[in-house]
Image: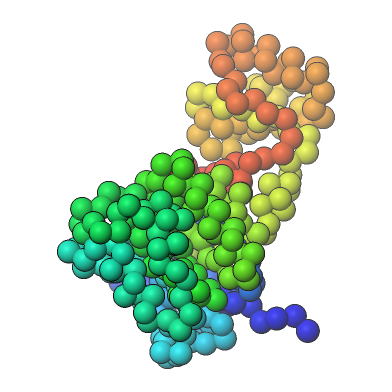
Amino acid sequence: MSPSPAVQVVDLVKRYDRTNAVDGLSVTMEAGQVTAVLGPNGAGKTTTLEICEGYRRPDAGHVRVLGLDPRRDARELRPRVGVMLQVGGVYPGVKAAEMLRHVASLYAHPLDVDVLLERLGIGSAGRTAYRRLSGGQQQRLSLAMAVVGRPEVVFLDEPTAGLDPQARRATWDLVQELRSDGVTVVLSTHFMDEAERLADRVVVVDRGRVVAAGSPGELTSHGARDSLRFSARTGLDVAALAAAVPAATRAEEVSPGRYVVHGAVDPRLLADLTAWCAARDVMPEGLSVGQRSLEDVFLELTGTEPR
């Protein structure tokens, strides 16, 4: 018998005025996995996660986290769940280490505060008031507050936004360590490389619904064979391009300035494509053969750049 999912969302609806921010969304997040939730601004992903965290009440559908209702069972659920917020939740004058020690004191078996601060590169800022921390330091303190209680499920909202490469890598290492310890991580991010690197499963949300879900490999492998991909100026004549490369079956502009030529990929197709571009003074940038990136998938599904 398989274990129950850590997070289950069924036919979720959330309305603001006459607009459905979440419109019948259903998703399952398995225990012990990292699930990355992707979507353009306004897609409904943040509202969905806030309902899962118990901060908002759904208008229809239901949500279960560790088998419990996030609002009705909040007292029972709170010690088992960690939540990382983008902003707020910290008194501006409190010192970073004091704040983290206070949060740790609310749990039965918290992580070592000093070790966690050092791990995230903010040990030297422990005696600094929150308002005097840099944006990146505040971000890392928020992450520390979400995980210090050893949660079974942790929701991370843009955990590496504004971080330098070293801090970003330290955050990635921590997420991977949480997963190794059996923690379920729900990660909202706009960084496609972060999702590809960390996620066991990716859920793409647009217009209040799930438009795709699967492992990064599953999402990027679908439709990946026999194609050439490149970027160039917008508005190229894709019909003329397809006609100019005999091996091609179809050419399309999948999003502004991003093109795919489908066909049997061989040296002749590559030569015909570059010759056609050269005759029109077009530079095919990022020319690649075969598998799509997660960013390609995102753009094809949502028709917008990640923001």
Q: Position of residue 176 (x, y in %)?
A: 59, 58
On-image quarter of the N terminus: bottom right
Q: Quadrant of residue 41?
A: bottom left
- Give the answer, above or below, for where 203 lies relative to 60: above
Q: Quadrant of residue 97?
A: bottom left
Residue at the limit of the structure toward the left, as seen here: 93
- Give the answer, above or below, for where 282 lies relative to 187: above
Q: Position of residue 218 (x, y in %)?
A: 72, 53
Determine the residue positioned at 61% across, 45% down: 294
Q: Is residue 177 left or right of residue 69?
A: right
| Residue toward you, 91 or 220 | 91
Determine the residue positioned at 64% across, 60% down: 201
Q: Is residue 213 left or right of residue 157?
A: right
The answer to whether one can see residue 71 in this image is yes
Q: Position of residue 225 (x, y in %)?
A: 78, 38
The answer to whether one can see residue 40 in this image is no
Determine the residue positioned at 52% across, 30% down: 257
| Residue toward you, 159 or 54 | 159
Q: Is residue 176 left or right of residue 162?
A: right
Q: Quadrant of residue 149?
A: bottom left
| Residue toward you, 92 or 107 | 107
- Give the answer, above or below, for where 251 lies relative to 58: above
- Name the colour scheme: rainbow
- Give the answer, above or below, for where 271 lies relative to 94: above
Q: Position of residue 223 (x, y in %)?
A: 74, 44
